[in-house]
Image: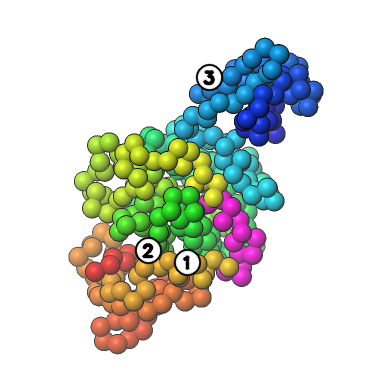
Amino acid sequence: MSARDKIFNALINNRDDYISGGQMAADFGISRNAVWKNVKSLQEQGYVIEAVTNKGYRLVKCPDILSPELIKKELNPALSGPDIEVRAEVTSTNTVLKETASLHPDKDYLLVAGRQTMGRGRLGRKFYSPDGDGVYFSLLLHPKLTGAESQYLTTAIAAAVAKAIEKVCGFNAVIKWVNDIFVNGKKVCGILTEAVIDFETAGLEYAIVGTGINITTPKDGYPDEIKDVAGALYEHGKAIPGVRNSLVAATINYFYEYYEKLAEKPFLEEYKKRSFLIGESVKVIGNIAAPDDYYEARVLDIDNDLRLVIETPDGGIKTLMTGEVSIRKI
C-alpha cells in the first residue's frame, strides 16, 4: 500500500477527529513533509481536508468520484482480492486489460473507469459508456477452468451485480439470460467475458470479466438504437453520493464469495431465482444480422450447465448455449 493510500485510510478511519501529521509520519515511516505532499495531492483530487495547527488533518468531505481508496474501504476485510486501478477514461476496460495482461501474470487485477470511448458488448455490439453516467470495470482472473467452464464467470458476475444493485440501491434487479441485468424493465448492465485458452493444457490462461452499469440517464438521453432498451438506476443528477464506488465494491465482494468455489456453481440458485425469462415466451434469433428470422418458444428452465431449456411450438425440448442465439422476450 502506498503512503498516499495509508494516509487516506487514516483520515477516513478518523473522520470525527484530527490526526496529526507527526503521528502519520511515525506510523508510516515517512517524513512530515511527505505527509503534507500526499494530503495536498488528495486535496487536488477534490477531497476536502481541513488542516489546523497543533491538531493535524481531518477529512471533511469526499468528492463523488471513483476512487481506489473508497472502493477498498468497502471491500470485505477478509477478501484476498484484486489489485485496483481507477482511470478517468479508457478505450475499453476489457481491451486495456487484454493489452496489459502479461504485466499481471499471477495476481487478479481490477480496472475501473468513469468513461469508455470504445466500450464493447457481446456479439460485436458497442456498449454506450458516457462520462459520469456509469461505471465500467473489468476483472483480470487466472481461474483453473476449461474454456467451456468460462461461462461460470459470466453467470457468477451477473448474480453478483444483481445482488449489489439490490444491496446498495434497493432496487430489484433481474437477469436476462445470459448476461444482462434489468431494473424496472430496462437494461442497466451488460457483461462481457473474454478468455485466452492455453492449448497445451486446454485450460484458461486468463479470463477478463467486463461489466458496465448505467448509473444515471444521460442528460441528452440514450442513442436512438438503444433508447427503447437501455435504462439507468437513477434519473440524471439524482444518484446517491458514492454509489459508483459502492456498487463496484459490493459486486467484487459477492463475486469472490462465488469465485472461491466456482466449480461447485454456488451462484446458480441466485442466478436462476433472478432470471426473468423462465416461464416466458421468447423469440429465438439464430443470426443477429437477420433479426426477423426467428422462431417462438417458451422458456422452461436454465439447466445445471447454464443452458436455456426451451419448448418449441411443436412440443419439442431444446437446450441453447450462450453465443448460439439471441433471445428476445415477447
Q: Nearer the viewer, residue 317 or 26?
A: 26
Residue sitting farthest toward the front: 16
Tell me the magenta residue range. Answer: 251-265
Residue that numbered label 1 is attached to: 271
Residue that numbered label 2 is attached to: 176
Residue type at mark 3: give it.
Glu
Task: Answer with the quarter of the image where residue 73 lies.
Answer: top right
Q: Earlier in the sequence, mark 3 or mark 2?
A: 3
Say what secondary structure mark 1 lies in.
helix
Task: Answer with the quarter of the image where residue 179 lies.
Answer: bottom left
Residue 248 image position (x, y, % from top left): 51, 46
Can the viewer see residue 116? no
Say what secondary structure mark 3 lies in.
helix
Which residue is located at x 24 percent, y 69 percent? Answer: 330
Residue type at mark 2: give it.
Lys
* C-alpha span from label 1 to label 2: 10 Å
Which residue is located at x 62 percent, y 24 percent? Answer: 58
Q: Earlier in the sequence, mark 3 or mark 1?
A: 3
Residue 92 relative to residue 330: left or right: right
Q: Quadrant of the N terminus?
A: top right
Residue 210 image position (x, y, % from top left): 48, 49
* C-alpha span from label 3 to label 1: 42 Å
Residue that numbered label 3 is attached to: 44
